[in-house]
Amino acid sequence: MPINQEYILRVSGLTKTFSGVKALDNVQLAVRKGEVHALMGENGAGKSTFMKLLIGLQTPDSGEIIFDGKALKTSNVNDVLKKGMSMIHQEILAVPDLTVAQNIFLGRETNSGLFSWLDDKKLTKQAGELLEQMGVSIQPTVKMKYLSVAERQMVDIAKAISNDAKIIIMDEPTSALSSKEVATLFRIIRELTKKGVAIIYISHKMEEIFAIADTITVLRDGKYIVTKPASELDVTTLITLMVGREINTLFPTNFSPQGEKILSVRNLSRTGHFSTINFDVYAGEVLGLAGLMGAGRTEIARTIFGLDRFTSGEIYIKGKKAKINSPHEAIRHGIGYVSEDRKQFGFIPRLSVKHNITLASLSTLVSGPFIKSKRENETATTMMADLKIKASSLNQQVIYLSGGNQQKVVIAKVLLAKPVLVILDEPTRGIDIGAKAEIYKLINQLTASGIAVIMISSELPEILGMSDRVLVLSKGKQTAMLSGAEATQETIMRYAMQSYSPTSH
């Protein structure tokens, strides 16, 4: 292939096979210097495999990668990094017990003094300057394990930028970020592209793609489909190219009548996280929780589910005061919780689909010390069918499922306990547009069956498309309770960015 110096990266004929199945089949890509090039496709389209081949995590079976005018033959990650290619992974890679600064410069530490001691002070200073330049208020001396998912994601972005890369691959970089943080990231991306840095941008969020991308390449079933300027595509056309069919209505209409009051939260407070929270949730409705990073959305959910202790306030289930000091007590009261970080808290990767689904409800599937295998198989088979979980068998390890099917396994596990209230924290984070539509239909099925749903999401279109009412939070305080008719992106953002007003309950 003739090398065009305008391009920082040219890929042709890239093929990769696993156990006789082609994950990538003759894929191509051409990325110009200083452009944002979106790589689109459903989960399973081959995007992750493609990126792993580029960054040196895996070796291609065949094909050519030309990076910065030279053939890239190494499959060593450090070599690729040194040549000027960085990647922000969807699943955040961090060392929990090291500081933010130490994580940013991991493997590139500065030494000083006679005995070449680690110059921690210099690392901290450089990390602080980088984070300040990014407009991110994270202390470089804090250990990573104390940061939220969104904060860890911003640190990962800082790490990629610190490499002085010529091309940065961003795999779902905003999956845990609120609108404000996304705006910060987009500002950083524009500053990088002005300097000639190329960005390969992978996201399932359509509004982001059309806001930031210059060029879009689509993969489907491991094959190259098309490359077009973003200006020549619209959402409908792009979705059709990705899935090979039209998805007419992304957000299904909820016709479920409002039922009895399931949950009442009164003056709930947790020192340092949120205070004086008051709301009700009814059977058959979706209550959306909206707010910026640090607003307290996840903290409230964790407290209701008994993962964290509240300082003061009361929780009522169906009108009766509930004592909830642990997840076990929450489940006993009919509360189910799907965490925003499914891989860390939602399932056990190396266990089968069957065992993950039934794990939390084994007490109903045992006879004495023995598990009733037949009943367990029947139960898991029913849940797989009801939730349309795509897996090769009940015994397939969950780690090998797509993101959307992993999420369905987590939801199946929660539903097996027959909850009256389900809390969904970022239920479609990191899953493709087709799987999102299926999750939304599933949420409607829950409300149609009389289950109350609390849905936390950083995607305002999702909040608006799925919620009957929206509770808006800002800095640990509630600033508004909006009806579906009152809720707009502008209204939610106005309340999400304002200070607490005692009258705005």
Image (cartoon, rainbow, N blue to C red):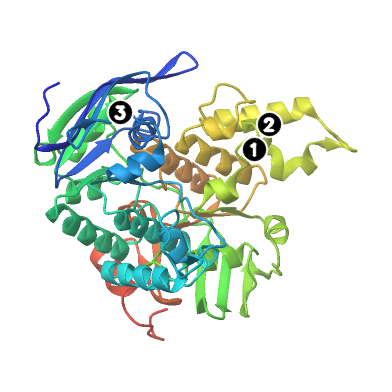
- Quadrant of the rendering where the N terminus is positioned: top left
Does residue 273 appear anywhere in the picture?
yes
Badge 3 crowding class, 10 Å Cα cut-off, few under 14, some 14 to 19, many 20 or more, is many
Q: Earlier in the sequence, mark 3 or mark 1?
A: 3
Query: Which mark lies nearer to you, 1 or 2?
Result: 1
- In the displayed image of the protein, which residue is found farthest to the bottom? 502
Q: Quadrant of the C terminus?
A: bottom left
Name the amino acid type tagged 3: Val
Apparent side of residue 352 relative to residue 443 in the rendered image (left or right): right
**Residue 400 percent location from the top left of the image:** 53, 30
**Residue farthest right in this picture:** 368
Q: Which residue is mark 3?
A: 243
Q: Which mark is residue 357?
A: 1
> Are circles 1 and 2 on residues that touch, CB within 8 Å?
yes
**Mark 2: which amino acid?**
Thr
Q: Residue at x 26, y 37 (%)?
A: 39
Position of 285 with respect to 80 (left or right) is right
Q: Residue at label 2?
A: 379
Q: Position of residue 275 (x, y in %)?
A: 51, 80
Where residue 226 appears, as percent x and y from the top left, is 18, 26
**Which residue ends up furthest to the top in the rendered image?**
20
For the residues labelled 3 and 1, the Cα–Cα distance comes to 28 Å
Is any part of residue 488 visible from this angle? no
Q: Where is residue 326, by image quadrant?
A: bottom right
